Every structure is written in C-alpha cells, then in structure tokens.
Amino acid sequence: MQGKKIQQERLFINFQLSEYVPADNFYRQLSQILDLRFLYKSTADYYGSEGQKSIDPVVFMKLMLVGYLENLTSDRRIIRTCRMRMDILFFLGYDLDEEFPWHSTLSRTRKLYGEDQFIALFKQVLKLCIDHGLISGKRQAVDSALVRANASMSKMIEKQVMADASIYSQELSDNVGEEIAEQRKQIPGVNKSKTKRTPTSNKSHYSPSDPDARITMKPGKPMNLYYRSQVSVDTGSHLITYIGAFPGNAADNVSLPIILESIVENMQEHNIQVEEILADTGYSSGEAMRSLADHRIEGYIPNIASYKKDRLEEGFIYDLENDRYTCKNGVHATFRYQEKLTKNKKLQRKIYRTSPEDCMNCPIKSMCVNFQGSRRIKHSLDKPLYDQMHKRMTSDKAKLFKKLRSSTVEPVIGSLINYTGMSRINAKGIKQANKCMIMAAIAYNLKKLLKYKNELLSKEAKLSKAA
C-alpha cells in the first residue's frame, strides 16, 4: 500500500538539540576542545556598566568562526545559515526558537574589538595544535597571496580632485560667476575636464571607502584593489603558524623582517626555536637576510636576479681580504664610498673604482672604462650574506627544500582562499582585513586539528579491535 505523508506542524514538541547532534559531528567535537571563556575578561573594557546588553562575546566569536568554517563571506549569510543548522545552533548554545542578533551586530562588534582579541584566539588554537604534537615549528615555509579588498576601482578618486573641489566650493560661496570660473581654468594641477580617468596608480588615486586598499597587479590576476596576506606554514604538519595583512603593493622582502618577528615570538612562547625559513626570490634582500641572521635562522631564499657572485665574465675578481676588485691586467678597483641609503634598503651599495692613470694604457680601455677614464663597480653592502645564500642554495638540501616549500605553503594558501572565506575581505581597512585573515587561519587550523584527532581515534579503535 502506497504511503502518503501529510504535513501538519505540531504546536508542542519535546526536543533537545543535544540528543539530535551526533557525537562525531564537527561542531560538537569543536565545542569540546575550544574554550572561549577568556573573552569575557579580555573584552570587558569595551563595554559600560549600563545600557542595553550586547551580543555575548563568545557567541560573536563563534559566529565569526562559523563564517570561515563554512566559507561564508557575508554577515547576512552567516546568520541565515546558522538559523538553519542544528549542529551550529548547538555549537552556539542557541535553541531552535531563540532569536538571533541582527547581521549588522557582527560588523559593529568586529570593528569594536581590537586585533589582540583575534590574535589571542589564534594563539590558543596554535597551542592546541602544539599540545597535540602536530607542530615542530623548526622549519617554516613563507609565501603571500593577494586578497580582493572590499572596494571598487570604479569608485576611486583622483587625489588632486580634492583640491579642485575646495576651489569650486569657494567659487559658489563667493558668487563671482564666470570671471573666477575662467581663472580656475588657468590654475595648474586642477582638473579641467569632467571625463573620468582610469585609476592607474596608488600615487594618483585612492579609494574613499577603503583608503588602505592598494591597486596591485600580478601575473594571472587582474589589476584591482588588494590586500596582501603573508602566511607562514609549518612544513611538517601544514598548519599555519603566522598570518598577517599587508598593503597589496608591499614587497615581500620588506615584509619578511616583520613576519619573522611574529613567527619567532609565536614559537618561543612554546619553547620552540625556528631554525629554517623557506621562501621564494621575492623575499630576497639584504635587510631580510640580516633579519634572519639576527634571529639565528638559516634561510633558503634564492637571491635576486641582479645578484652577481663574481665579475669573472667582466674580467674582475673580488678580493675579500683587501676589499677590492682586480682585473686580469692587475689593475685594482678599490672601495671609494658607500651610496646613500635609499627607501628600498636592498639597494645599499658599495662603490669601487679604478684610477684613470692605471687604465690609461689598457688595450681594452674603450670597452671597459667610463667617460671619466676609470672603471666603476658596484656591489651590495650585504654581498657576504648574498654569497653565503648563493652557496647554500646550490646544495642538494636546497633543491629538496624548494619542492617542499611549493608543496607546503602554496596548497595551504589555496585552501584559505577557496574554502575558508578568504577569497575577498568583507570589511574595510587593513586592521579589519587582518582580523579576517586571522579568523580564516584559525578555521583552517581547527579543521586540521579535528581531522587529526578523528584519525587518531580511528587508529586506536582499529588497534583495540585487532587486540
């Protein structure tokens, strides 16, 4: 006999979420290992003693976490999804009929809390991973990725327009009509055309909704407004040990010293010494290598393309003991002066030069010397560090590390962008972007941690069954 289901809602029902959420459910397991009660004390200073009650800090952070675990990049979608999922309701401590906060409460609270609250949660999860023996911390792979900012290039403003606007408003207030309007056309630097220009430079344009976002271009990515996410991954476990937001146009080699400080600090809190850093050529600079040396870390970073180990093809040999270059004819190019410090610290250079008298009778003089009659040679102040790195990178160990780096940090960044809500920043400003990236890293690490725990339990069950 064919059955037919008749839908009729019951007015009363005896129901408990805890009975319907399975023991092996992700959010049930997560609620057992994640303790967020520290937030009550750490966020107390953000609230007064009177007025309407805010969202529970623990509930807020759990809602944020659900967003990244479920790859939800919208606060509206977070609230909508949580209402429909019994396991998430159980994780949040909500009943089926309990009212949720407005989605705007999430964005306001995210702005209210400082970065330290999110960093504290990241460190707590990192500690859980270390306590479970998942992170050795000795070898870290570093890489970066561009993440779309929550701003549009079509809404960018040319910086000189602000001066134009102030002049125009003065015209209206003075009511001087066509005469001043004609004078305005003669003012240099003022926009004379209403035609909208295409934003091409961070120097000429900025986003009024998110001034921290930067126009950035990269092979394989369209020119747009981005932030740059710097990520450090433990090569043994593929867990994230550091993540941070930087301007989209910030060079990797400039950011590395800042990254190293945070990585070393995160590991030293657990008495772990970082010994090796793996990165690509973009992180190569004198400042970066000095930072590695200061922290007693061995770097495996290919040198920049402009690096030259020696000048043999130019006919010069460097004499380290006497700090000079010598050509095949025995003429010495001695150290003369040091170039002034530039904004890009990787360009600090020492200048070596021969004397015009020594080069006067040289048979290849026309091919070698400059208009002053001498040969000028430049090399970086950090040449010994570059030479040391070059020697290290020619070893078999470095070749293995190159493959290890690409197979470790790159898939992790891909997972963050594609599956952990980091395809686009849903907030504005670099501080808010940093919070979003930290939450994405927390979600990623928690997924890895629970996967490890489940695999361990499965192995133990098989062993007990076999016994």
Image (cartoon, helix red, strand yellow):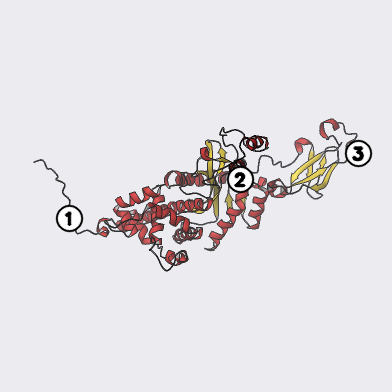
Question: Can see residue 98?
Answer: yes
Q: Which callout, 1 or 3, points to the residue nearer the camera?
A: 1
Q: In this view, does 458 lie to the left or right of 399?
A: left
Q: Mark 1 points at which residue?
A: 11
- Relative depth, front residue between 442 and 208: 208
Q: Residue 251 carries which label?
A: 2
Q: Outermost residue, bottom direction?
A: 49
Q: Give the quadrant of residue 352.
A: top right
Name the residue at 79% across, 41% down. 377
Q: Name the residue under label 3.
A: 357
In x, y percent, where is residue 90? 31, 58
Q: Residue at x 17, y 55 (%)?
A: 11
- Numbered disc total: 3
Please state, as top left, top right, bottom left or bottom right, where the C terminus lies in the image. Answer: bottom left
Q: Earlier in the sequence, mark 2 or mark 3?
A: 2
Distance of label 2 from label 1 (alpha carbons): 62 Å
Q: In this view, does 94 lie above or below 248?
A: below
Type of residue at label 1? Leu
Give percent across and percent down for residue 351.
Answer: 79, 45
